[in-house]
Image (cartoon, helix red, strand yellow):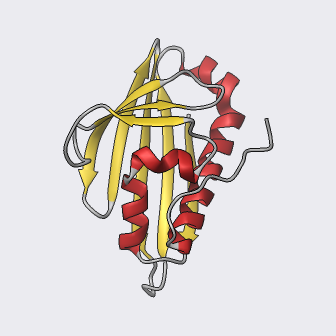
Amino acid sequence: MSYQEKIRIDAPTERVWAVLVDVERWPEMTASMSRVQRLDEGGFGTGSTVRIEQPRLLPLIWRVAAFEEGRAFTWTARSAGVTVVAGHYVSPSDDGSATNVTLTIRQSGFLAPLVRLLTSKLTRRYLRMESTGLKRVSESGTGCRAEPDTRR
């Protein structure tokens, strides 16, 4: 199953991209992330690994599989019987006044149907929280600060 969240952000693409790839600060941007830890040194790009802890989900290790500077990255995580591929895409709006962002999640593997059954609503909510957090931080230009998640 695949999930997709699209949002228009009234900020330059460069700013949105900078916020998006500053992955260790994501918990400041969204309550859907408890902790994000880079597991390697150097610039963020293809091959980078990150450990992400999220409320109500098991921690996962994500590895960047594809990276196009300023435009997109995808990363993959594997857990018993499930592979998850998450995409992060930014592009300038047609008139250049804003940035279009698309976030995607695709689950596969023999346990994916069960995982979907158990987490579909949560996955959709987290994608929405992440996109709106990215919008808020990118448009403010003042750095990250998470909004509390009051819907537990």
Q: Is residue 74 above or below residue 110?
A: below
Q: Is residue 23 above or below residue 89?
A: above
Q: Quadrant of the N terminus?
A: top right
Where is residue 51 shown, x and y percent of the image?
Answer: 40, 30
Name which residue lies at 60% across and 47% down.
Answer: 127
Name which residue lies at 26% across and 45% down.
Answer: 66
Horizontal relation, residue 75 to residue 120: left or right: left
Name which residue lies at 57% across and 43% down.
Answer: 3
Where is residue 102 shown, x and y percent of the image?
Answer: 49, 58
Tell me how many marks there are.
0
Q: Nearer the viewer, residue 102 or 130?
A: 130
Horizontal relation, residue 49 to residue 116: left or right: left
Residue 62, image quadrant: top left
Q: Is residue 134 above or below residue 76?
A: below
Horizontal relation, residue 58 to residue 70: left or right: right
Name which residue lies at 56% across and 71% down.
Answer: 8
Where is residue 77 shown, x and y percent of the image?
Answer: 40, 28
For this orientation, the residue located farthest to the right is 151
Q: Quadrant of the C terminus?
A: top right
For this orientation, the residue located farthest to the left is 42
Q: Is residue 92 above or below residue 126?
A: below
